[in-house]
Image: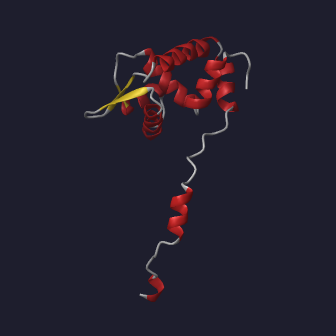
Amino acid sequence: MSQDEPQHIRAFIAGHIESVVQLEVLLLLFGSAVRTWAADALARELRIDRAWVEAQLAQLCARGLLTYCEGKPPSYQYQPRTTELHQAVSDLAKAYADRRVSIISLIYSNPPKSPPAPDPLKSFSDAFRLRKDNRNG
């Protein structure tokens, strides 16, 4: 991981950003924090697939960086859960504007986020689940 960036930016990227496209979505909403964005509008603005945008928006909401605004169509707004998250995004936006290649390198140097580990107790209990055998009718 690049040592050129402050530790809090490296930690934020490692914990919250999975791709450059996800970062672009976040920074677009950060740059227009008073506006709400529907997935269609973001997809047109960034020239990417709507389904991809929807997935990124859901992840950013789950990470406490955006809020979901119900409506027709549903929309999203930059509104981080904590001031620390806001400060990290603000610092990241400045670093990305000044040192884009360094930030992109940080994103690609992080291993992909893996799904949560399965619950061992649930896996054990599922092993004893009775299932109807379709071969015998």
Q: Position of residue 110 (x, y in %)?
A: 67, 33
Q: Position of residue 18 (x, y in %)?
A: 58, 33
Describe residue 66's horizontal placement relative to residue 24 as left or right.
left
Q: Position of residue 48 (x, y in %)?
A: 48, 33
Depicted 54 relative to depicted 28: above or below: below
Depicted 90 relative to depicted 1: above or below: above
Residue drawn at x 46%, y 16% as measured from the top left = 83
Residue drawn at x 63%, y 39% as measured from the top left = 112
* Residue 50 found in image quarter: top left
Kindly give the residue lying farthest to the bottom in the view shown. Answer: 136
Q: Position of residue 21 (x, y in %)?
A: 54, 30
**Total labels drawn:** 0
Residue drawn at x 45%, y 15% as measured from the top left = 31
Depicted 21 relative to depicted 84: above or below: below
Image quarter (top left, top right, bottom left or bottom right) of the N terminus:
top right
Q: Is residue 17 visible?
A: no
Residue drawn at x 73%, y 22% as measured from the top left = 2
